[in-house]
Image: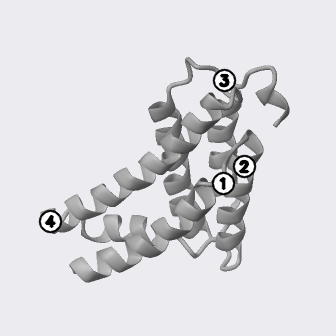
Amino acid sequence: MKEVIETRAEDVLTQQRRRLRRVESLRGFELWRDELVERNALRNGAYGCPLGSLANEIADHNEDARRAIAAHFDEWLEMLIDAVERLKTRGVLRSDADSRALASGLLSALQGGYLLAKASRDIYPMRAALDMAIAQLRAYATETGSST
């Protein structure tokens, strides 16, 4: 079980690390969203998140597996926090933006979007959830950052 978790997590996190390192503007988060939604659209929303699917399937049955999956989600959350912090440092977002809350909202919107898209075989809920999370980021945009 541990090997399956590690393999799936590494696949997901490698892709996320690559994409999130490039986020330097609000548009960067939109491109991140577009890539995720477009990949999921290739299978009519059936793609889902390999890490989220594992969490759903085994978290209640195996405490060690649950902890391992949670640690990988924490790593993903930290990548998102780093991207939000980068926008604050660049003056795109105001300094009072709560990076952890905004990143948590993005990750939660993504995971909920994956689940709803998988159940309905429609990517609309995924795009809508991510759009709303990105809109929350935009609420903290500086005058300079609002155009990016």
Residue for point 51% across, 53% down? 112
Real-space CA distance between mark 3 and mark 4, rounded to the nearest whole angstrom: 38 Å
* View extreme (right): residue: 147
Image quadrant occupied by the C terminus: top right
- Which residue is at a point 53% across and 34% down the rendered structure image? 102
- The residue under label 4 is 64
Mark 1 Cα within 10 Å, few/some/many (few <14, many 20+)?
Answer: few
Which residue in the protein does label 2 denote? 28
55 or 18: nearer the viewer: 18
Q: Distance between the Cα atoms at labels 4 and 2?
A: 35 Å
- Of badges 3 and 1, the one in the foreground is 1
**Residue 73 in view here:** yes
Tell me whether the residue at label 1 lies in contact with that at label 2, contact meaning CB atoms closer than 8 angstroms: yes
Verify CB contact (< 8 Å) between mark 4 and mark 2: no
Instruction: Answer with left or right where residue 122 lies relative to residue 62.
Output: right
Ranked by sequence position, the earlier of labels 3 and 4 is 4
The CA distance from mark 1 to mark 2 is 7 Å
* Label 2 CA crowd tier, 10 Å (few <14, some 14–19, many 20+): some
Q: Label 1 amino acid? A: Arg
- Depth order, front residue of 24/53: 24
User: CA–CA distance between discs 3 and 1?
Assistant: 20 Å
Q: Quadrant of the N terminus?
A: bottom left
**Amino acid type assigned to the residue bearing label 2 in the image:** Gly
Is 61 left, or right, of 4 in this rendering?
left
Residue at the spot of label 3: 140
Mark 4 or 2 closer to N-term?
A: 2
Q: Which residue is mark 1?
A: 22
Q: Secondary structure at mark 4?
A: helix
